[in-house]
Image: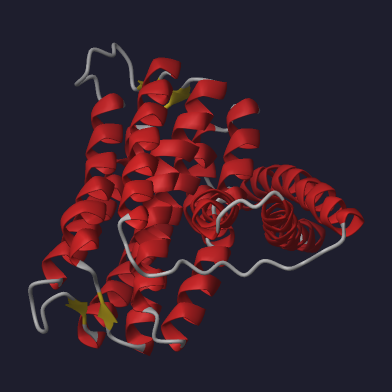
Amino acid sequence: MITQILLLALGLVLLITGANGLVDGASALAKKFNVSDLAIGLTIVAFGTSAPELVVNVFASYQGHQDIVFGNVIGSNNFNLFIILGITGLITPIVVQSSTIWKEIPISFLGIVLVYLLTHHFLGSDSNTLTRVDGFLLLLLFGLFLYYVYKQLKSDPVEIEVKVNNYSNLKIWCYVIFGLAGLVIGGRLLVTTAVDLATTFGMSEKLIGLTIVAAGTSLPELATSVVAALKKNSDIAVGNIIGSNIFNLFFILATSAVIKPIDYDTVFDLDMYILAGGTLLVFIAMFTGKKKKLDRWEAAILLVGYLGYMAYIIQK
């Protein structure tokens, strides 16, 4: 058991350091080819923070661990929304831009509703399965979202800054290669060990996916948002959370379905309702207390709500 826990921790460390290394190397390489900070931020950096979830889901989907696929995405989104946004809001009240309130949060909610409909016979499916066609549909919508973000940032006069190190070519390729290796080895190790732990403790793969795997793969978002909050840069803190949730639903879950159709277990319905309710709660919070701001007491509600939800599903 101790060996399994250590291997799980090693998998998480490899995942996160691999993602960081890949982002550093790929950003430096892009900069050498005169790629703009905007393009680097939209692609390499944005994909990098969600790389752990993506790699874990690719392995879980390929190996047929469908509860880990859904558990990781739904669990990560709930962790982002309740824990990371809650902690960030306690550090400093978060001022939110109008575009986030009226566009990004509704898009995130739309993603939840769409995934629910696709897995519940509402759109012509004869089974609770997220098919390859569903996956391609979600990928198409994700492409439209990226185009919207690109247009939004192009029209924003604020300069987008991305930290890019000036490495030698050898160092760049070392970062890229070892970063990819860390992601692949860490992802495989995390999935395999999580399944072994579930078997050892008599736990379901759903619970492991919703808790240990989801929280572990969300660590990059937690670090990014906490640092942004400490620097009083709330736009990055909120944008990182909502953007990550959209990314998870429209890209990571879609990619998993394209690799192999995923059977959806309706025991995840409660977790989907919690995610939808939390997203609506954040939207409503923009109009209570100080407008366009997540106040500390609202952030505290998010944290307490998540702890209650975790206690319930673990007890169940």
State the scheme by which the image is colored: secondary structure
Q: Residue at x 23, y 69 (%)?
A: 97
Residue nearest the observer in this picture, 127 or 172: 172
Q: Which image quadrant for residue 141?
A: top left
Q: Quadrant of the C terminus?
A: bottom left
Residue 296 lies, with reference to residue 52, above or below; the image says: below
Look at the image and tell me whether residue 182 can be seen: yes
Residue 19: x and y, percent? 68, 56
Is 234 left or right of 211, judged from the image as shown?
Answer: left
Would you place residue 275 above or below residue 118 in this image? below
Locate residue 72 relative to residue 89 in the image: left or right. right
Asked if one can make out residue 264 in the rendered structure from this viewpoint, the answer is no
Determine the image quadrant of residue 298. Answer: bottom left
Looking at the picture, does residue 315 appear above or below residue 308? above
On the image, the x and y values in percent for residue 165 come to: 73, 68
The answer to which of 218 and 137 lies nearer the viewer is: 137
Identify the residue at image location x=36%, y=54%: 154
Which residue lies most toward the right here? 170
Residue 177 drawn at (x, y percent) = 83, 47
State the residue at coordinates (28%, 72%).
302
Instruction: Report how many numbered discs are placed on residues in the image.
Output: 0
Give the residue drawn at x 67%, y 66%. 164
Seen from the viewer's position, the closer of residues 220 and 40 is: 40
In the rendered view of the protein, which quadrant contains the N terminus?
bottom right
Return the x and y of residue 18 as percentages of the image width and height. Answer: 74, 56
Q: Is residue 301 left or right of residue 24?
A: left
